[in-house]
Amino acid sequence: MSKERIGQVGLGTVGIHFARRLMKANGQLIVLDLDQDKARQAAQEGAEVASSPKDLAARSDIVLLSLPSPEAVEAVVMGSNGLLEGARAGTLVIDSSTIDPFTCRKVYDAAAARKVHYLDAPVSSGAPGQGGAEAAKAGSFTFLVGGDKVDFERAKPILEHLGNWFYHLGPPGSGSVMKLISNHISGINTLAIAEGLVLAAAAGFSAERTLEVCQRTVAQSYVMEDIVRPRVATRDFEPGFSVDLMHKDHRLAQDLGRRLNVPMLFNQVALEVWQMIRSQGRGHRDHTECLKFLAELARVDLYNPAERTRAEAPAG
């Protein structure tokens, strides 16, 4: 990696692993996060902490963003005391956040007016056994990139420390379009798997047994094998990719469909289910929480379905 000074805004579940990998690769990193505990943690591991996005940009040649929403990206880049107020001409912003393509283009244009370069570069998991935070920790992400090709080439030495696959997909917003499509498919797949496991439990098959069999049927998928199955096996549903974030991505996909005049029937159903889970105060939990939620609605035990089957199975 070149010795360009690197800054990073956002130290969440994925961002903290990005920061660690960048510090190891480059020997330095300037960081910023609204959560002061996260910033202090990064400082203890060797990072410098900026006082504001403006301060971070003034001290960086390349800035990586790992933020939760379009609103957060706009505030950090274009807001008062934001990156564009401190960035010099030629600064490169690599935005790994999952946001909508319309915000990407707005930010790209605002940056270009200051001679600052902007790439939308959201990430997705693709390596077996490495979804979400695991992919960030292992550096195995797929980067979906929109923006100018010359900026993509400049960013690649950094991206290569964070991922294994890199696609330059076209002009600003292209990466974000593909990420929303990917998460649209993944989210609906997760809900379909959850519903199927609940139906199987109601019929007397445990989640483990159903997943074992479906591994060798047409139902098999990356989501089933590398996201759902490990969590069912370990019974560890700690957050990796939250319900709130999945809901946000489906909301952005729905808006994209509306703007492009594409019916999004299954996406609308998915949105409603994620919102139902959020309404119970469970939005911060991993999106595989949908298994527990649907099992509760059906009054089944995913692991020990026999009692419910005997007591409540429909006659005939």
Image: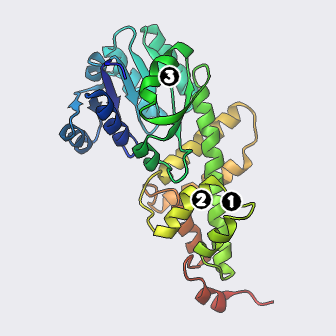
- For numbered disc 2, what is the local secondary structure? helix
Type of residue at label 1? Gln
Q: Residues within 10 Å of mark 1 (few under 14, many from 20)?
A: some
Considering only vertical position in the picture, is 38 above or below 31? below
Type of residue at label 3? Leu
Type of residue at label 2? Glu
Distance (Cα) linking label 1 and label 3: 34 Å
Q: Which residue is mark 2?
A: 225
Q: Left or right: where does residue 263 sit relative to residue 123?
A: right
- For numbered disc 1, what is the local secondary structure? loop
Which mark identifies residue 23?
none
Distance (Cα) linking label 1 and label 2: 7 Å
Q: Nearer the viewer, residue 251 or 199?
A: 199
Which quarter of the rendering shows the N terminus?
A: top left
Q: Do labels 3 and 2 touch, CB within 8 Å? A: no
Q: Which residue is mark 3?
A: 119
Q: Left or right: where does residue 261 sit relative to residue 282?
A: right
Across and down, in percent, residue 220 comes to: 68, 59
**Of discs 3 and 2, which sits in the foreground?**
2
Q: Which residue is mark 1?
A: 220
